[in-house]
């Protein structure tokens, strides 16, 4: 990846109830522990707002990584997609699979599917939450040439955002008081199959984020719209820092302000930094420019890097479960849930 326009988004495993995949057990089991938000955060969360679980969010990330790399056209990709559909249905969300053929930068046809889940589908006021679920087909930031390329595990770049949104889906489905707004979760496919580092052919930003481009031009419901959207990309690493990304500030500054303010109020200011960062081409760019829905991007930004937007493990074999922190996942999940309940309260 390159800085600015060429940037694309891109443990101990402790659970008290086993959470396994369709390939190795009951994929519809829940994984959750007693509430484990810090006490000071529990005191701030509105009484009617359910509390997310760090171990559960972590389990959702692990479940995806256990399928191996989720590269389009691979068995792991197919199996993980089936798991995501099954899990969302299990939590009672209305699920739509949007299957399509995407053409990669090298003209390879990628058998792809966007997975859309809807909560309270009849509500007119809707919030869109999204993340990409595919993984990078090569570790091009560490391999010296294409002969050494291998797919990455994508624990942070892909699985973390999906894991957080699955935890949001689980939390809402089991809440005693549910929000009265509509919520849509989209797992975009074929986001990360763009040109590798050192690519000598023609480079174009539109050769990334293929799933969001397809959805923006072919929405799952005619005339679909949302009040606003929030994209998650790389939201699970230890020491993650989320700055206000450039296109988010251009197209949806008030939403950025709202989300960062809520995160600060919840005590997550160490993650959500109220400073601006450069613009990147990510799925939110196409939701903004093609679908005309204001959307922000919560994405880990390395403010100390000299030549990159991202941390050193980005698009390398080091993007595995070792870099994932369940407290980071929970901070993002709880912030999103509070945003949703605040919107619901505003309608009352």
Image (cartoon, rainbow, N blue to C red):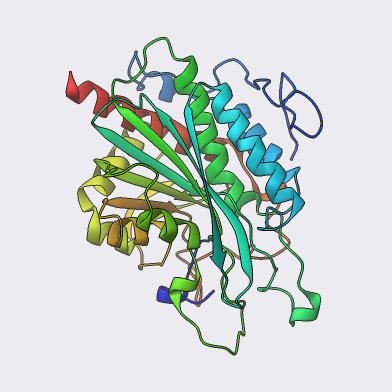
Task: Determine which quarter of the picture holds residue 261.
Answer: top left
Residue 248 relative to residue 9: left or right: left
Q: Position of residue 331 (x, y in %)?
A: 47, 36
Quadrant where the C terminus lies?
top left
5 in relation to 171, above or below: below
Indicate the quadrant containing the N terminus: top left, top right, bottom left or bottom right: bottom right
> What x and y, as percent, mark residue 217?
36, 58
- Residue at horizontal 80%, vertical 26%? 25
> How many numbered tags mark residues here?
0
Tell me what residue is drawn at x 28 percent, y 48 percent.
256
In the image, residue 105 lies at what x, y percent? 56, 76
Residue that extends furthest to the top in the rendered view of this protein: 176
Nearer to the camera, 274 or 107? 107
Quarter of the view holding residue 175: top left
| Residue 72 in the figure: left or right of residue 265 | right
Q: Residue furthest bottom?
A: 200
Q: Is residue 270 visible?
A: no
């Amino acid at each position: 990846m390159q800085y600015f326009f060429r940037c694309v988004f891109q443990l101990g495993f402790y659970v008290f109830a086993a959470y396994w995949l369709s390939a190795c057990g009951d994929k519809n089991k829940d994984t959750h522990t007693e509430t484990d938000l810090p006490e000071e955060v529990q005191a701030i969360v509105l009484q009617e707002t359910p509390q997310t679980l760090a171990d559960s969010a972590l389990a959702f990330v692990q479940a995806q990584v256990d399928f191996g790399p989720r590269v389009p056209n691979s068995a792991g990709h197919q199996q993980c997609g089936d798991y995501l559909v099954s899990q969302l249905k299990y939590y009672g969300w209305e699920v739509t699979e949007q299957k399509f053929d995407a053409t990669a930068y090298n003209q390879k046809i990628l058998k792809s599917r966007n997975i859309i889940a809807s909560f309270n589908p009849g509500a007119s006021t809707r919030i869109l939450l999204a993340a990409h679920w595919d993984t990078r087909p090569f570790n091009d930031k560490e391999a010296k040439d294409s002969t050494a390329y291998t797919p990455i595990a994508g624990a942070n770049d892909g699985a973390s955002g999906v894991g957080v949104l699955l935890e949001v889906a689980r939390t809402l489905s089991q809440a005693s008081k549910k929000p009265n707004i509509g919520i849509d979760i989209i797992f975009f496919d074929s986001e990360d199959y763009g040109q590798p580092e050192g690519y000598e052919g023609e480079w174009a930003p539109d050769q990334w984020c293929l799933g969001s481009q397809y959805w923006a031009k072919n929405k799952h419901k005619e005339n679909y719209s949302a009040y606003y959207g929030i994209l998650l990309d790389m939201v699970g690493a230890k020491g993650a820092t989320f700055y206000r990304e450039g296109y988010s500030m251009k197209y949806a500054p008030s939403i950025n302000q709202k989300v960062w303010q809520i995160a600060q109020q919840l005590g997550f200011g160490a993650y959500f930094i109220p400073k601006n960062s450069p613009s990147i081409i990510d799925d939110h760019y196409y939701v903004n420019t093609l679908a005309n829905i204001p959307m922000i991007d919560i994405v880990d930004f390395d403010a100390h890097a000299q030549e990159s937007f991202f941390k050193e493990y980005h698009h390398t074999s080091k993007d595995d479960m070792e870099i994932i922190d369940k407290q980071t996942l929970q901070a993002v999940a709880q912030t999103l849930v509070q945003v949703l309940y605040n919107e619901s309260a505003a309608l009352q």
